[in-house]
Each structure stands twice: as C-alpha cells, then as structure tokens.
Image (cartoon, coloured by chain):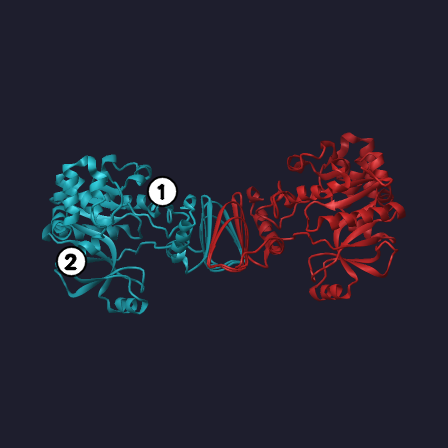
Chain colours: A cyan, B red
C-alpha cells in the first residue's frame, strides 16, 4: 500500500518455535498459533492489527516451510505468495534479509515494518499511530527506527534500549546508545527508575533498501548466501544453511550509529510464559484466571488454560494448570519459565510424541 | 457349586455409584469399573478372587439395570442369567433380598457369601480361606457370619464391629456386641488399641434361607414387596420402589443376637478416595504414586492417575492430579474426600455432562 509517497509493507516474523507454552505449543504449533488471549491466534491478531495501516496486500509473513500450511489456515486472507517460506529458521537477520529479497522492488524501496508474530497489544490505535510516525521518520531520514516499549515494571526477561538524554529530533524519537540484554533485577529496577530505558519489542521500521545496505556491510555472509540463491535457486536449502544464525538486534541494530526509537505506550506484552496470562486475562474474585471450561471450589490465585475438556480444581492455590490435546501440565505460579526444562527432559527421554 | 455338603454361591453387590473417584468414576461408570490398581477393574478382580471357591457358576452379581451392560462387558464369563438387575438401587437389604429371591432353590438353601464389588485384597489365599471358614460356621450353626478386618490404623472412615471378650466357639469366630459407625479419631484410636474392634468390610456369609427368615421378621416391607413382585412380575419397578431404602447392616445385622465375625487379615482396603491409592500402588523415590503416562520434574509426594494422555508435573508437592476422559481434577493430597463436594457443585450447576 502506498501512503504519503512511500509504500508501506509489514513483515511479520512467524518462524519461531518456543517451548515455554508447552503443552499448548508444540513443534508444529508454536506460540503464534495459540489463542492465548481473545478469540483468535496471536498471529491472526498481529495481522488484523496492521490491516488499517497497509491492507492485506501489504502483509508479508516469513516462516519456515513446515509451519506454512498452518499459517495459510490461520490467516487465509493473506495472499499465498506473500507467505515467504524459509527452508529452515536461521534467526531474524537471515529471515529479514531473505524476505526483503523476495519482496517486489517497490515494496523494498518503500518502508518495511518488522513485527514479531506472537505479542499482545492492548491499545491498537496507539500502536498503529506509533508505527505510522516511525514510518514517517524512516522515510524522511533513512534511519532505522525501533519501537521501544515504555516499561511499567522492572522486567528481567526483556532486553532494554538505553536512550540518549536528548531527543533525536522534534519527532519524539530518541537516539539509542546501547542495547542491554536481560538484566538482573536490581539493574532492571534502576533502568525503569531512570526513565531512560525502553523495552526492546523487536519492532523495527526502515526503508527496505537501507536495511539491505546495512546487511551488506554488517552481515556479508547472509548477503553472499542470498546472492548464491539468486544464481542457483534449486540449491536454496543448501545456500540457506550457509547463512550465519544471527539475530537482527545483534547482527545489525547494535552496530548502527544512527538508530532511533519511538516510545510505545500501548499495553504491550510478549506473553513470555504461562505466568504472563494472569496479566492479560480477567481474574475472578478468587484470583483465578481461567480460559476454557474451568470449575473451581475453594481455590485462589491460579491460572487455568483448558483448551479442550474441563479442568476442575479443588482447594488449590498458586497453581498453573494447562490442558491441551493429549497432555496436562501442572506447575506452581511463578515457575512457568521452567517449563523449558521440562520440555528438555521430554526431549532427552525421546518423547517426541509430546513435543 | 456344592462343597462338603452345601452349595456355595457368591453374591457380588455391584449397584453402587459413588462420587469420590470423580472424574474417573461417573454415573455410568462407578468405582467398581475402574482399574484403580492392577490391570483389571475392581469388579473383575472381585470375581476372579472367588472363582477358586465357587467357580463361575456360583457367582451372582446384583446391579441396577443401567449398569448391567457394562458389567456384561467387564466380566463376560459370568453367565448372563446370574447378573441380577434391580430396576433401581434401594440400598443393600433390598438388593440381597431380591437376589436371594431370584436364585434357584438349591443355592438359596446353601451358603451365600455377600461381597462388595469395589474393594482390594492383597492376600487372596487368606481371603478365600477366611470365607471358607465362615461358610463352614454358617452351614453348621445357621448364624450369620461377617468377616471383620483386623485394623492396622485408626481409620475414621470405616464402621467398626465391637467384639465380645470370649470367642464364640472353637472356630475362631467372635460374637459381635455392637456396630459402631465412623467414629471420631480419638475413639478410633481407642478401638484399635483395645484389640476388640474390627472394621466392617460389608462381607457377610449365611445360609440363604436363614437370611430370608431374618428379613421376613425384621424387614417385612421388603419381603412384602418381593411377594407382590412374585404375584405381578409386570409391575416389578413399581413394587420395587415400595421397598424401604435400608442397608443390610442397619436393617438386619445390627438387630441380630447371634451374629459372629471371623477376623480377616488379608491386606484389605475399600479404596475410599484418591488418597487411598498411595497406600496400594508403588511410589517412586520422590514419593510419586503414578498410574498411566506421568512425567515429573522436581516433584514429590503426589498421586497421579492418567487414564489417558500424559500428565506432566513440574515443581509441585502434595497434589493429586487425575486425568480421565474429558476432565482433569487437581486437589491437594489429604483432601480427596472433598471431591464429593465438587461433584455436588457440578450437579448444582447442571453439569450433567461431567457426572
């Protein structure tokens, strides 16, 4: 979609496969396919959220081949040729480079918004407004703009963007001095107190050709592989496997001098684990957050996710109970980050049937 | 089967429908149908246990009409005409009277052993030996003999039989002075300490005609209804509904002067609730009692019953988790007696689909 002189396209990165939402998330159904909040999957919500910005003709989804059928099912309105299939996931820098190489020239010369596929946003209007302002900046300045979430608590699970003291311009954007990965709690508390840190939400806005220039300079291994694929498209998988596995944050963003961020205050969450559900879904008067058919008696402060069937709780507190397909998970509240340990154990024990 | 001059038949009472094993037990699948311990249902185990005593020709099962199809499925070797269908359960005194009235004359004149269908017995040889001795006493003395379980702890959930000081005879049988229903803990402790109390296991051995005489005298309402059914078999359900709902313990046994008991020490349990599983199934080194496909990490002292699918526990203690069909139950250890409260709530909320 062309708006105010530039094409705007949204690239949704949907190749990820986490383990923190096991047993709801499995190899063939990662988090972005889950209906963790609301009536549709996180991916579907992500696409719906940007339609007013770019229409369905401007939505591109980058994923791995084995997830693409499910994606076609979940967002049937996105044209099939805008679902870009990586032979295999190699982190976000290759995904973005590959996606840009597959877009038509006009899109690539325009503004591209990169979005994760599995986040939640409460205030969608504010979200789109911020993206729109970021697109304006990226189109006039040729900088890469990130959207940084204004933190409302000292989260240790996110990366932080450290801002320069002064605004970069009269656009409200701020220059980023430094990326800081998941900090210790005390550090995170200081970050939030200082008012000079934003959460890195993995949202980037840039002119496609500008990003490709950066990639050419900073990640020649990726661009060489793309050139090889161009020459020998029948050896796609082979050349793809040559790309370094590197994130766009680490591989490009952290190396840029003129990176700016726009603060985003829209009720954003990445829903990092089962515990996070308590923050986004309603609780009853006993502190029970329930999704699905849940019956409880003498219980409090628990999270229940019943994807099918019924979950009945009697006299329990501070539990997370998940029922999804053939598996049930029970874990205390506050420990759902450790689900990946359980998943690792299942892997070690050869329980591929459960993964 | 005729042995040593008298016919021996076993009457298994299998009409009960408890709620304490929800969600595994439902209206159409009460506890006796569950495989709570071992490879077969409690009913199947009950029948197998007495086959050396009376053969399959001596096994009678009294149940209600709506359970009879499932019974035929679970114990297919028992001849269909030995499965006696009450139109509707009206407690044990009517069930026994009705069953006796349906047995052939020879069986009725012989010895009948009444057994619950949903108990567990560890030492089956000892169990049969005690039944055999009880049958001997009942055949020579025309008394009603109960088997009383030697208590190994101060259980408040059972009824107790108070014994006379002196043995009734040289058979090892003891006269029963009194039935005491579920006592308070302190009382139960005194009972066990005294050595003069046995658990009432609901196991009775008598000559059929003797029991019918007692019933005629003590429960004329039941016998009148049976006579009416005899006259008007097409009005069975109607006359059956006229019978008083009364247990054999209360309606007959407690009124008898010459009731004796034989102590039974065979590892008996009535498996009264999910908590009881911990006493009869093996535990792993972390105190986890697991049945079915169970995965646990950093857990201890829990009971898991996964009838289908997989139950995964992470970092929990002292929980009972049950997965059966469309329902999952989570309740702390020690509180499974309260499952009936949960079931009551489900009933009040119109959740017949779960009951």
- Camera-nearest residue between A59 and B208: B208
Label 2 resides on the chain identified as: A
Question: Could you tell me how many numbered marks the image carries?
Answer: 2
A329 vs A199, left or right, is right
Which of the labelled discs sits on residue B256, or is there none?
A: none
Instruction: Identify the residue under disc 1.
Output: A28
Q: Are marks 1 and 2 on the same chain?
A: yes
> What SS does tag 2 mark?
helix
> What SS does tag 1 mark?
loop
Instruction: Identify the residue under disc 2.
Output: A255
Q: Quadrant of residue A171?
A: bottom left
Q: Residues within 10 Å of mark 2 (few under 14, many from 20)?
A: some
Residue at the (43%, 56%) spot, across then down? A283
Residue at the (80%, 34%) spot, across then down? B229
A280 vs A6, left or right, is right
Any part of residue B252 in sight: no
Question: Would you place residue B189 above or below residue B132 in this image?
Answer: below
Any part of residue A147 in sight: yes
Residue at the (26%, 58%) spot, across then down? A265
């Amino acid at each position: 979609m062309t708006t105010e002189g530039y094409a705007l396209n949204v690239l949704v990165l949907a190749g990820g496969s986490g383990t923190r939402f096991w047993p709801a998330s499995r190899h063939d159904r990662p988090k972005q396919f889950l209906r963790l909040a609301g009536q549709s999957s996180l991916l579907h919500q992500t696409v719906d959220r940007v339609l007013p910005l770019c229409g369905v003709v401007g939505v591109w989804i980058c994923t791995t081949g084995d997830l693409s059928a499910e994606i076609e099912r979940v967002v049937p309105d996105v044209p099939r040729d805008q679902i870009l299939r990586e032979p295999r996931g190699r982190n976000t820098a290759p995904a973005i480079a590959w996606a840009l190489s597959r877009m038509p020239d006009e899109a690539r010369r325009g503004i591209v918004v990169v979005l994760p596929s599995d986040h939640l946003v409460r205030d969608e209007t504010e979200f789109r407004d911020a993206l729109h302002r970021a697109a304006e900046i990226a189109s006039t300045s040729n900088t890469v703009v990130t959207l940084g979430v204004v933190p409302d608590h000292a989260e240790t699970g996110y990366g932080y963007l450290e801002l320069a003291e002064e605004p970069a311009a009269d656009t409200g954007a701020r220059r980023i001095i430094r990326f800081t990965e998941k900090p210790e709690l005390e550090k995170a508390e200081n970050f939030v107190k200082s008012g000079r840190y934003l959460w890195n939400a993995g949202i980037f806005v840039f002119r496609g050709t500008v990003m490709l220039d950066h990639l050419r300079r900073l990640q020649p291994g990726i661009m060489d592989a793309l050139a090889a694929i161009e020459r020998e498209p029948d050896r796609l998988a082979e050349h793809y496997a040559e790309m370094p596995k590197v994130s766009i944050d680490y591989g490009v963003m952290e190396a840029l001098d003129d990176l700016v961020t726009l603060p985003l205050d829209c009720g954003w969450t990445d829903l990092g684990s089962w515990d996070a559900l308590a923050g986004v879904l309603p609780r009853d008067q006993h502190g029970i957050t329930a999704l699905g058919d849940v019956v409880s008696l003498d219980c409090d402060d628990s999270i229940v996710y019943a994807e099918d069937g019924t979950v009945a709780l009697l006299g329990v507190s501070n539990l997370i109970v998940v029922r999804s397909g053939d598996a049930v998970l029970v874990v205390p509240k506050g420990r759902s980050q450790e689900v990946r340990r359980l998943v690792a154990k299942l892997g070690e024990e050869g329980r591929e049937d459960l993964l």
